[in-house]
Image (cartoon, rainbow, N blue to C red):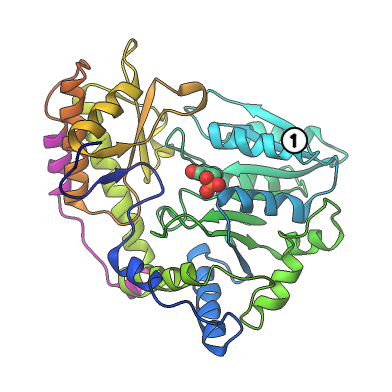
Amino acid sequence: MPYQPGRHFLQIPGPTNVPDRILRAIDNPTIDHRSAEFAALATACLEGLKTIFKTTGPVVIYPSSGTGAWEAALVNTLNPGDRVVIFDAGQFASLWSKMATSLSLKVDAISGDWRRGADPDALRSKLEEDTQHEIKAVMVVHNETSTGVKSDIAAIRKAMDAAKHPALLLVDTISSLASMDYRHDEWGVDVTVSGSQKGLMLPPGLSFNAISAKALAASKTSLLPRSYWRWEDMLETNAKGFFPYTPATNMLFGLRESLKILIEEDGLNNVFRRHDRHAEATRRAVRAWGLEVFAHCPEQFSSSLTAVLLPAGFNEAELRAIILREFNMSLGAGLGKIAGKVFRIGHLGHFNDLMLAGTLCGVEMGLELAGVPHQKGGVTAALAHLTERAPQVSAADGAR
Ligand code: PLP
């Protein structure tokens, strides 16, 4: 690879760009994880995460990628052979579903075309048919990173309540937490799964479970085998500011800095508004190019990434390779059954207007060099949106 001057543009939908001050925080000397200093650090992280998940209940931190937290959500709450429902709405839902099968769960997938999110009506019908309450959990990916489609978790909860069904609600927020509005308690979620490498602006390496009282009660009797992922040991030691095994100490330094930025300095509502605005500017660019946003319904558009459908006969891998070679920018690949057809623009985390402008310039130039038929003016359309000024609010208001 020849030398590339300037900064690499990491515009995949996670891992995202890590702010220098978070890198500096991670760069602190590692401390004794049984010291009072560590207990203060861990407690600050565990408490701050409650604000991010919008919960008063416990949040568990694992030294693992998001996949670990997926597994933890299942093995802590369910029993061998339990029936679970999942929406086949994208590649990550399909991987979580595969995991559930490998853990001996009986997965009932509600199929979809990947351009739409979870359908609350279909779920309600399925749950109403289950008069014996054999279904023990509903699994939903809040923001499908493979498609740029968001699901309405409040509507899913409403459908479950309308069906008077007691299944647990397990939600993956790996690419939405701290980028898009999310409310663990208010939306009646039982386990929220997330990871460090997207909206939290950290490197990959930490994952999370936010846990409801109902999920915690289920964990007291559930029998799926678990050891490393067991909530009980975690919660017991977390209560004193410690971990049952060696924690990822330096990642926690980074997490404390991230929480300070998100909660005290920026404010979650500012964070969400910025993501909404960048997503809208990106969609305007895509439409001006004459290309198609993959997500079908405007109310389901993701604010953390945009998946773009290329015209038939053009391969996204070739386009991305040209953009990487010529402009030193990484974009998200098409995944699963839409590989080759769709590329993804990540606009989440540590990101601003000029970074978005640069990203879209790279895409527009790449379309030209790759010979993809398009109209000029996508960048101009995005800039016009970015210069419509939205009012900022203080961090105190932004946090509400
Ligand atoms: N779920 C979603 C929505 C994701 O975007 C990802 C990864 O990008 C995962 C799960 C898997 O997480 P990880 O790769 O951190 O294990």
> Residue 383 at what x, y percent from top left?
13, 42
Q: Under tag 1, what secondary structure? A: helix
The verdict on residue 139 being magenta is no
Q: Is residue 62 above or below residue 298?
A: below
> Residue 71 at what x, y percent from top left?
68, 49
Q: Is residue 142 visible?
A: no
Q: Is residue 124 visible?
A: yes
Quarter-wise, where is residue 27 in the image?
A: bottom left
**Where, quadrant-wise, is the C terminus in this rendering?**
bottom left
- 382 vs 185, left or right, is left
- Callout 1, which amino acid? Thr
At x 15% / y 29%, what residue is drawn? 365
> Residue 304 at what x, y percent from top left?
37, 46
Q: Is residue 253 above or below residue 184?
A: below
Q: Going by the picture, which residue comes out furthest to the bottom?
A: 36
Q: Which residue is mark 1?
A: 101
At x 66% / y 29%, what residue is drawn? 110
Which span of residues is magenta-colored? 379-398
**Where, quadrant-wise, is the N terminus in this rendering?**
top left
